[in-house]
Amino acid sequence: MIHMKQKQRAHLFVCHLLISILFLLDATIAKSQITTEVSAHINPSEHNPSVFKTNIATIGTTDGITNSSHLLSADSTGLSPLVNRTNKTTKLNRFFHTGIDETTYRPHLTSFIVPTAFIGFGVASLSINGLKNLNLSTKDEISEHQLKHSNLDNYSQYVPVAMVYGLNALGVQGKHNFKDRTVIYLTSQLISGAMVLPLKHIVKEIRPDSSNNLSFPSGHTATAFSSAQFMFHEYRDSNFWLSISGYPFAIFTGTYRAINNKHWVGDVVAGAGFGILATELAYWVHPKINHLLFKDDKTTSATIMPFYQNKHFGLSYAKQF
């Protein structure tokens, strides 16, 4: 009996260690992607103060207006290093009258390492004896310690997405405005549901509490991790540590699906993988969906013009929405 308990604890420890390593890998990969993307898109002229100084220096106090016409082209991009980034496409979004970045999101292959590993672990747990024993031993450990059940997992799955909208309402702006992030989130939930719900009826795995045969994969966990991944994408460019603050709520949701005797460990891990994958795909297809739903071909324009007033020389900046 003592040997059996030690074996169960060893299995549970290995499971927790594996999940922790995969999450650390996910965070490390995500952070390295941000660094790579930023360095790849830096245009030296955009960050060289001498460019601005040179343009100003070429405009004299008497012939500034005349010479400025050579700097500004007809499409107001004469000072493009200062006004427009050539590597991004900016379109007018009339929902909130704000310029948005319409650059197509292209996920790196590394973005799929963690969700693929999670899904693979879950699928393997359906047939590999060692992982099936891990499912059973984890259930026994939970029963032995008589952990208290809670229905908070029904609500914690939505906390990350609520945080995104709450932070934006408080002025902590994310990557997209209200309309675009709503379209992205709803798309991720549609993709997640399209993967999770059919699998439940195809696999027909009995739940730990034997209530039905719709255990694999965990829908609650898929929703929780798709929401956490959504928060990560919205804030990773501005605040990396804020962007990953939704994951603890996702982990809480998955953990309590097992504690509540509703899912096996493999169901929870697979659900996390499907949730992350759904959000990655949602950001990838968003530009096409946005174009289909909100066709808007107008573009923003910006203009810089020199002026001389009260013996002071300067530049005026105007942007049309």
Image: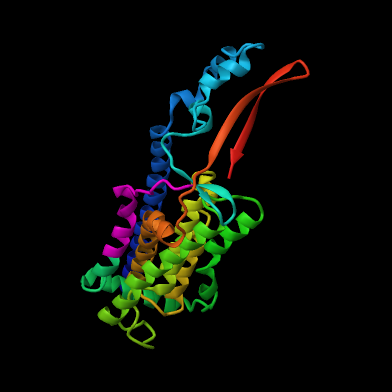
Is residue 317 shown above or below 58? below
Q: Is residue 48 visible?
A: yes
In the displayed structure, would residue 158 be above or below residue 239? below
For the point 40% across and 45% down, which residue is it? Answer: 28
The residue under the point 47% across, 76% down is: 145
Residue 295 versus residue 144: which sits nearer the camera?
A: 295
* Residue beneath the point at 52% across and 21% down: 71
**Residue 243 percent across, percent down from the top left:** 51, 51
Residue 271 percent coordinates (x, y): 37, 68
301 or 42, nearer to the observer: 301
Asked whether residue 251 appears in the rendered view, the answer is no
Quarter of the rendering occupied by the N terminus: bottom left
Q: Quadrant of the C terminus?
A: top right
Residue at the image position 44 percent from the left and 68 percent from the top: 223
Residue 96 counted in the magenta span: no
Q: Which residues are magenta?
A: 101-120
Q: State the image quarter where residue 313 is shown.
A: top right
